[in-house]
């Protein structure tokens, strides 16, 4: 009889409560400054590309500025 339990890997999730929002804003501003200047959007392709660029800027800022918390099966919800 096998009584061993499978161990789950701990998940790391962003901890937005611990963010230094001033630094976050600076980093996001730097990321947004690298995007092309604002221009009228007239095609769906332009809209899609602008949305992708904005999403990448936000994700890069979150990855660099937001600390992570380790969640285990014994953590409080």
Image: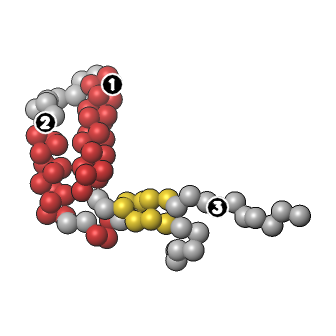
- The colour scheme used to paint the residues is secondary structure
The CA span between labels 1 and 3 is: 47 Å
Examine the rendered structure and indicate whether residue 33 appears above or below residue 13: above
Examine the rendered structure and indicate whether residue 14 appears above or below residue 48: below
For the point 33% across and 29% down, the residue is 48
For the point 26% across and 34% down, the residue is 53
Residue 16 located left or right of residue 10: left
Examine the rendered structure and indicate whether residue 30 appears above or below residue 34: below
Quarter of image, res 13:
bottom left
Q: Nearer the viewer, mark 2 or mark 3?
A: 3
Q: Secondary structure beneath disc 2?
A: loop
Instruction: Look at mark 3 in the image and give the residue it sits on.
Output: 7
Instruction: Look at mark 2 in the image and give the residue it sits on.
Output: 34
Q: Position of residue 23 (x, y in %)?
A: 15, 60
List the single residue furthest toward the right. 1
- Density class for disc 3 (Cα within 10 Å; few <14, some 14-19, many ≥20) is few
Residue 47 visible in the displayed image: no
For the point 40% across and 65% down, the residue is 69
Q: Earlier in the sequence, mark 1 or mark 3?
A: 3
The CA span between labels 2 and 3 is: 43 Å
Q: Which one is nearer the viewer's eye here, 59 or 36?
A: 59
């Amino acid at each position: 009889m096998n009584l061993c339990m499978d161990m789950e890997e701990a998940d790391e999730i962003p901890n937005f409560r611990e963010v230094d929002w001033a630094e976050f804003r600076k980093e996001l501003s730097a990321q947004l400054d690298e995007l092309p200047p604002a221009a009228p959007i007239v095609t769906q392709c332009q809209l899609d590309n602008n949305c992708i660029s904005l999403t990448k800027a936000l994700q890069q800022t979150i990855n660099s500025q937001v600390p992570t918390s380790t969640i285990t099966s014994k953590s409080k919800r």
